[in-house]
Amino acid sequence: MVFTDTHNTIFAAPCGDISNIHHFIRASSFWRGFFLQHLSSDVLPDGRMYYNIAKSVVEPLLKGNYELVTDICGEVQKQINQNVGIGINAIKPKLN
């Protein structure tokens, strides 16, 4: 799956590697295509995105992305802190 590959590639790359940006772009393109293909007005009732549909389809995807991004950001911050000799741990923000 795109996100597993992206996650593994980003963690394997050195901190600050510019190629990591391309993995994020690839992942975002994947989700854009998913939404365009599976959640168009043609397949939604009355062509609308109702709350219950968004709650059951979109929210889990966004929460999964949140977990992925915050894990990666935390790891990058940890590497940066170690590289400059700062002994502060990265703090994962709460989902709100």
Image (cartoon, rainbow, N blue to C red):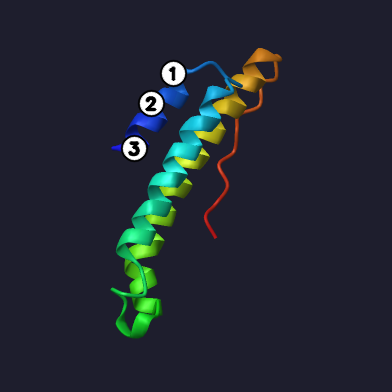
Q: Which residue is mark 2?
A: 8
Give the camera-side residue of 45 and 42. Answer: 42
Left or right of residue 73: residue 31 = left
Write down the residue under mark 1. Answer: 12
Q: How many residues crowd around disc 3 within 10 Å: few (fewer than 14), some, or many (20 or more)? A: few
Tell me the number on the disc at residue 34: none
Up-down: is 86 above or below 55? above
Q: Position of residue 49 (x, y in %)?
A: 40, 76
Locate residue 96 relative to residue 56 in the image: left or right: right
Is residue 11 visible in this depiction of the protein? yes
Looking at the rendered structure, the secondary structure element under dot 2 is helix
From this viewpoint, which residue is outermost toward the bottom?
A: 46
Amino acid beneath label 3:
Val
Mark 3 vs mark 2, foreground winner is 3
The residues bearing labels 3 and 2 have C-alpha atoms spaced at a distance of 10 Å
Farthest-out residue, front: 42
Instruction: Determine the image quadrant of residue 68.
Output: top left
* Amino acid type for the residue under numbered disc 1: Ala
- The residue that mark 3 highlights is 2
Separation of residues labelled 1 and 2 (CA atoms): 6 Å
> Residue 73's spot in the image, x, y percent?
56, 34
Residue, x 66% and y 26% (percent of image)? 88
